[in-house]
Image: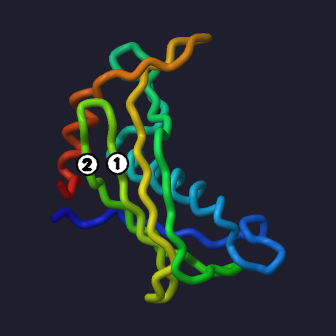
Amino acid sequence: MPTPFHTSRMVEFSDTDMAGIMHFSAFFRYMEAAEHELLRSMGFSVYSEIDGDVVSFPRVAAKCEFHSPARCEDVLEIDVTVRRVGAMSVTYGFEFSQKGRDVATGEMTSVCCRVPHGEPPVSIPIPNAVAAKLRERASD
């Protein structure tokens, strides 16, 4: 099984609620940012020009389960795994921890789309170069 991609992020004051606990919605932004970091580490992005087309990866599903609170200025460790690479979509898993404490687990599925200027996105097969790099990291 490939080693998960690892990143970290400090919980900012703006990510917390009135109780001082990280707001549930911030986890989704952190997952998106970690996905972007993973793709950039492979030489790609969530929004790139590939073979003359603007290609993006909009999210079609996302979920997160919360196990213990994260608070302002906690540094969260985020491990990203590629759980599944399909013809047109990729599913990621996310593990959030803080000093060895399990904070949350999440999952997100993104679909590959061509994004014509001024038109709605159109789903397309993941370009071969991107799919090959994702499969190198896949756990399926």
User: Where's the N terminus, which quadrant?
Assistant: bottom left
Q: Measured from the top left, where is residue 70 in percent x and y?
A: 62, 79
Dividing the picture into quarters, in which one does residue 125 lie?
top left
Establish if 112 lies above or below 42. above
Q: Is residue 37 left or right of residue 16?
A: left
Q: What is the three-letter code of the residue carrying label 2?
A: Arg
Q: Measured from the top left, where is residue 19 in percent x and y?
A: 80, 80
Q: What is the three-letter code of the residue carrying label 1?
A: Thr
Instruction: Count the labels in the image.
Output: 2
- Residue at point 24% right, 31% down? 87
Q: Measured from the top left, where is residue 64 in percent x and y?
A: 50, 63
Query: What residue is shown with label 1?
Result: 91
Q: Residue furthest right?
A: 18
Q: Residues within 10 Å of mark 2 (few under 14, many from 20)?
A: some
Dividing the picture into quarters, in which one does residue 140 lie?
bottom left
Q: Measured from the top left, where is residue 25 in percent x and y?
A: 65, 59
Q: Is residue 61 left or right of residue 19?
A: left
**Earlier along the polypeptide chain: callout 2 or callout 1?**
2
Establish if 84 lies above or below 139. above
Q: CA distance from mark 2 to mark 1?
A: 5 Å
Q: Residues within 10 Å of mark 1 (few under 14, many from 20)?
A: many
- Residue at point 78% right, 65% down? 14
Front one among 63 and 41: 63
Query: What residue is shown with label 2?
Result: 84
- Cβ atoms under marks 2 and 1 closer than 8 Å: yes
Establish if 95 lies above or below 92. below
